[in-house]
């Protein structure tokens, strides 16, 4: 990108000016996060002081976070539930999607294109429209109020198949043909040749799926009722209901909910941005 | 990873080998796509069929399957007369305005970031922050920022001399625009990244030719960048409209449809009727309406693509 920008030969001065304008706008854009962090560090009485004390005059960090993590809302459990559901959903989704992507690009069988069209068409059916019947199904087959139900729901999302299919299609069939001549079956070709070749694509999709699952509010909200099964998103809500008067605590809980994802994002930043721009996709 | 083919090389008859290889190929195909296909059937197709059936009943799932009787299109007739559903539909339509506004902001930023500023990857991360932050967390922050009496937003407004600042989320007139502002803030990063990716695909020599002709930055934007980004804009518009119709979490956490039903949307009504009032049939009819709207937008996309989109 930098070489392109240089190719446009924008004057250094105007570039500095544009950068400065963006920095200013970026600061305003991020103010809610700054406010959240700052409120989580101070005693409750200082939260609404005006003008806003961006850097707290009085600090109360340990007490605030201790009340969140050690309080009645059982934050560590919500965390554990979120980790469990997000990791399992991501694993299932990657396996199912990668297998389907391989089947749709590298195995020749009758009905392949027709079936792909069916799968493609279901991608346009909004989950929100089928929530009511899914709820009825979940109630009658015992998936309601279980983590298994949530994992299955996210794990069979079609999106991964589309993303990965593009990458699988880009891999030359010669790899497969020569492996077949050597006597390899589809499973070993898939596992030993294709998967290693598309590792970056798998990583991209896995990170995206992890972020979406971690942040998902709707599915846990509809399909869970037992507080012991709550993910962090529902846990936050429960915590705010209980401690609604204590904004410093609610903000400490919000910071706690965001930090792990921020770490995942900063580590996998390149993959996330690549995945978003490639598939033009969103939760 | 066992290979079912081991030992095949020893089979003497070449014709039989070809036939069995073909069968194995078919079997392998279905094994690979099987799980996804099963998922699609169980989690999408069966629910969709059930949705249409339920929408023709006045069933509540609590009463058991033996009470499920088809009763015709009564639910849909009732929907037409339901003022609350009409309001929600209207709110969804008003909320659509957030899509082009957000796109315009994203395009402006994309041009600035990718062509006129230093540190593009840094800015991408900054503007993507709301997107990776859970909706529950950011909703609480905004509730406090928008707090009518203590919130910093109104603190600032009072300080600069606004005597009666709006009550934002607590005021039926301002609640929906406040929600829309939040939606734009959350989704800006995604649109921005997709626009930057789209701009990378514009051939550089077009700009060089324009430079030779002495074209101004504005001319280059309106004659090259903007027209060549129509596929991207079109994509963002369609996905944005669909996402808008599907919005639920943000409404549930931020306003719970209120105040005075002023921020309810279709999916919120589906939730209220289906999961709170337990009217499975009526909520299904609402879901059918949502499904038809989204289907219509999708068809519009297929039809419109050829007409409006500039194929560079």
Image: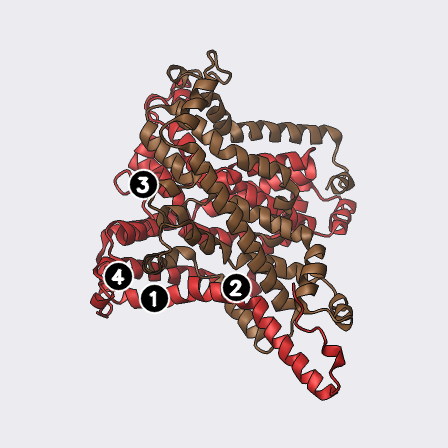
Chain colours: A brown, B red
Q: Residue at x 27, y 59 (%)?
A: B280
- Say if mark 4 contacts mark 3, CB within 8 Å: no
Question: Which quarter shows the N terminus of chain B?
Answer: bottom right
Question: Badge 4 is on which residue?
Answer: B281
**Residue B289 % position (x, y):** 34, 60
Q: Earlier in the sequence, mark 4 or mark 3?
A: 3
Q: Residue at x 71, y 73 (%)?
A: B6
Secondary structure beneath dot 2 equals helix
Give the residue at x 50% y 46%: A86
Q: Is residue B182 visible?
A: no
Q: Earlier in the sequence, mark 1 or mark 4?
A: 1
Mark 3 residue element? loop
Left or right of B305 on screen, residue A175: right
Mark 2 or mark 1: name the one nearer the start of the chain.
Answer: 2
Front residue of this view, candidates B291 and B226: B291
The chain letter for the residue carrying disc 1 is B
Mark nearer the viewer, 4 or 3: 4
- Which element is circle 4 on? helix
Residue marked by disc 2? B36
**In this rendering, the label closer to the viewer, 1 or 3:** 1
In-image side of B71 versus A237 (left or right): left
Q: Secondary structure at mark 1?
A: helix
Kindly identify which residue carries mark 1: B50
Who is closer to the viewer here, B132 or B155?
Answer: B132
Q: Is residue A277 left or right of residue B72?
A: right
10 Å neighbourhood of mark 1: few (<14), some, or many (≥20)? Answer: some
B13 vs B173, left or right, is right
Residue underneath mark 3: B256
- Measure the alpha-carbon separation of dots 1 and 4: 10 Å
Q: Residues within 10 Å of mark 2 (few under 14, many from 20)?
A: many
Q: Above or below — where is B75 with respect to B89?
A: below
């Amino acid at each position: 990108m930098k070489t392109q920008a240089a190719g446009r030969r924008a004057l250094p001065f105007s570039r500095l000016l544009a950068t400065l304008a963006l920095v200013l706008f970026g600061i305003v854009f991020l103010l809610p996060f700054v406010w959240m962090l700052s409120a989580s560090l101070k005693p409750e009485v200082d939260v609404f002081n005006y003008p806003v004390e961006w850097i707290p005059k009085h600090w109360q960090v340990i007490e605030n976070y201790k009340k969140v993590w050690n309080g009645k809302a059982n934050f560590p459990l919500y965390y554990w539930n979120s980790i469990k559901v997000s990791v399992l959903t991501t694993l299932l989704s990657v396996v199912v999607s990668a297998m389907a992507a391989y089947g749709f690009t590298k195995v020749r069988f009758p009905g392949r294109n027709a079936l792909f069209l069916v799968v493609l068409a279901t991608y346009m059916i909004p989950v929100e429209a089928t929530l009511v019947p899914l709820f009825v199904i979940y109630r009658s087959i015992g998936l309601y109020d279980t983590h298994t139900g949530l994992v299955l729901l996210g794990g069979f999302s079609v999106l991964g198949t589309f993303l990965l299919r593009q990458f699988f299609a880009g891999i030359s069939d010669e790899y497969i043909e020569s492996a077949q001549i050597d006597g390899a079956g589809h499973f070993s070709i898939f596992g030993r040749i294709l998967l290693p070749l598309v590792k970056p694509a798998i990583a991209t999709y896995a990170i995206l799926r992890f972020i979406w699952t971690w942040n998902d509010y709707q599915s846990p909200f509809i399909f869970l009722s037992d507080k012991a099964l709550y993910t962090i998103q529902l846990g936050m809500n429960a915590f705010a209901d209980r401690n609604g008067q204590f904004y410093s605590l609610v903000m400490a809980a919000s910071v706690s909910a965001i930090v792990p994802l921020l770490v995942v994002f900063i580590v996998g930043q390149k993959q996330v941005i690549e995945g978003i721009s490639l598939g033009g996709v969103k939760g | 990873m066992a290979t079912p083919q081991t030992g095949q090389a020893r089979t003497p008859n070449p014709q039989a080998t070809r036939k069995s290889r073909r069968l194995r190929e078919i079997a392998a195909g279905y094994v690979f796509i099987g799980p996804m296909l099963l998922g699609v059937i169980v989690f999408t197709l069966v629910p969709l069929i059930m949705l249409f059936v339920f929408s023709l009943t006045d069933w509540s799932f609590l009463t058991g399957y033996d009470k499920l009787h088809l009763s015709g299109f009564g639910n849909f007739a009732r929907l037409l007369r339901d003022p609350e559903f009409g309001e929600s539909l209207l709110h969804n339509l008003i909320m659509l305005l957030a899509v082009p506004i957000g796109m315009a902001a994203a395009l402006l930023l994309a041009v600035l970031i990718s062509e006129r500023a230093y540190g593009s990857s840094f800015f991408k991360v900054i503007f993507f922050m709301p997107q990776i932050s859970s909706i529950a967390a950011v909703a609480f922050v905004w509730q406090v920022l928008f707090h009518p009496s203590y919130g910093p937003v109104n603190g600032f407004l009072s300080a600069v001399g606004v005597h009666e600042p709006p009550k934002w989320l607590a005021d039926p007139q301002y609640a929906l625009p406040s929600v829309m502002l939040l939606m734009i803030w959350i989704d800006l990063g995604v649109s921005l990244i997709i626009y930057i990716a789209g701009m990378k695909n514009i051939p550089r020599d077009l700009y060089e030719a324009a430079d030779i002709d002495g074209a101004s930055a504005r001319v280059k934007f309106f004659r090259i960048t903007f027209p060549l980004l129509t596929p991207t804009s079109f994509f963002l518009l369609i996905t944005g409209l669909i996402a808008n119709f599907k919005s639920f979490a943000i409404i549930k956490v931020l306003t719970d449809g209120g105040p005075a039903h002023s921020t309810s949307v279709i999916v919120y009504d589906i939730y209220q009727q289906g999961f709170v009032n337990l009217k499975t049939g009526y909520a299904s009819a609402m879901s059918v309406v949502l499904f038809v709207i989204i289907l219509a937008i999708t068809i519009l996309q297929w039809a419109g693509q050829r007409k409006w989109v500039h194929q560079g």
